[in-house]
Image (tube, rainbow, N blue to C red):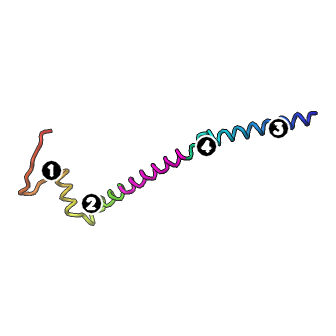
Amino acid sequence: MIRRKFDIIVTIVCVALLGYFAWHAFHGPRGFGYEKTISAQAKDLGAKLDQLRSERERLDKRVGLMRPDSIDPDMLDELARANLGFAKPGDLVITTAN
């Protein structure tokens, strides 16, 4: 009699655990229903990663032009004009009121 009650209790607990895990497999935050959402997020993040990599490559090339051992004269001229307000003789300079 006692053995029979123990078997029934163990069976009920096992079925309850199985039901709990089955429910989470279909409705939980990482269940089967959210696979498409997660794959869409992964695709968006992959596109953002590609964009950031191309931006970094562009900036690396620009920094490479400003290294002391290989300064590009055109880059130096562009930076001097933009940051210091330099102009060459004969350039037309237009100032605006800020």
Nearest to N terminus: mark 3 or mark 4 = 3
Label 1: few (<14), some (14–19) or many (≥20) C-alpha neighbours in 10 Å: few
Give the quarter of the image for residue 25: top right
Viewport quadrant of the N terminus: top right
**Residue lying furthest bottom:** 69
Spatial CA span between label 4 and label 2: 51 Å
Specify which label sits upstream in the sequence, 2 or 1: 2
Q: Position of residue 41 (x, y in %)?
A: 49, 47
Q: How far separated are the C-alphas under marks 3 and 4?
A: 27 Å
Magenta residues, start to end: 36-54
Q: From the image, tell me which residue sits under label 4.
A: 31
Q: Which mark is residue 66?
A: 2
Mark 2 vs mark 1, CA separation in Å: 18 Å
Marks 3,2: beta carbons within 8 A: no
Q: Which residue is tagged 1?
A: 85
| Pointers 3 and 4 in contact (C-beta within 8 Å) | no
User: Which of the 4 image quadrants contains residue 24?
Assistant: top right
Q: Which percent across, then down, holds residue 12? A: 80, 35
In this rendering, the label closer to the viewer, 4 or 2: 4
In the displayed structure, does residue 13 sit left or right of residue 77?
right
Inspect the image, locate mark 1, and give the three-letter code of the amino acid beneath it: Gly
In reply to whether residue 24 is colored magenta, the answer given is no
Q: Residue at x 31, y 61 (%)?
A: 61
The residue at the point 13 percent across, 53 percent down is 86
